[in-house]
Amino acid sequence: MASATSSRVTLLAERSLDSASDQGTLLLTATDDGPRTSTTVTAPASQTSSPAFLEQMLAAMTTIAMMLAARMILFLATVGAFTLTYLAINQGTMTALIAAGTYDVLVVCPMVWLYLQRG
């Protein structure tokens, strides 16, 4: 058995199955000759997190949400630009192509520029 200092897992408690058989649960399986007992092990209660840690996690999650929201808006604008351009090419009129180009210049290009400036 490995020493406790070299392992990352810490043993909290150890019980033999014979001493814990009165606390065990009954397991039935189709391949066994009869029922057998097994102990149920419950994990110890976790410690409550400090308020400073919770504030840091909230700030990190807020930053991630803001980045994903900016990327989602840029993605939707890009999809809209491609769809508008596709429809303008299929229609083939000069007015539709001007509308698609105007959308690209006035909406998509500034959004891409702002996104690249924020990082």
Image (cartoon, rainbow, N blue to C red):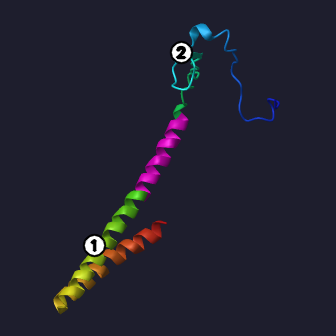
Up-down: is 107 above or below 62?
Answer: below
SS for callout 1: helix
Quarter placement of the N terminus: top right
Residue 25: mark = 2
Find the distance from the CA under tag 2 to the CA under tag 1. 59 Å
- Identify which residue is drawn at 47% across, 42% down: 58
Magenta-drawn segment: 52-67
- Identify which residue is drawn at 68% across, 10% down: 18
Residue 28, position as x, y percentages in the image: 51, 20
Residue 45, position as x, y percentages in the image: 56, 22
Of 14 and 51, nearer the camera is 14
Of 16 and 72, nearer the camera is 16
Asked if the magenta segment contains residue 105, the reply would be: no
Asked if the magenta segment contains residue 60, the reply would be: yes
Of 46 and 64, nearer the camera is 46
Residue 113: mark = none
Q: Residues within 10 Å of mark 2 (few under 14, many from 20)?
A: few
User: Residue flagged by tag 2: what amino acid is it?
Assistant: Thr
Is 28 situated left or right of 113 in this image? right
Residue 60, position as x, y percentages in the image: 50, 48
Residue 15 image-quadrant placement = top right
**Residue depth check, mark 2 versus mark 1: number of the one nearer the observer:** 2
Is 74 situated left or right of 25 in this image? left
Q: Which residue is mark 1?
A: 80
Residue 77 image-quadrant placement = bottom left
Up-down: is 15 above or below 48?
Answer: above
User: Residue flagged by tag 1: what amino acid is it?
Assistant: Gly
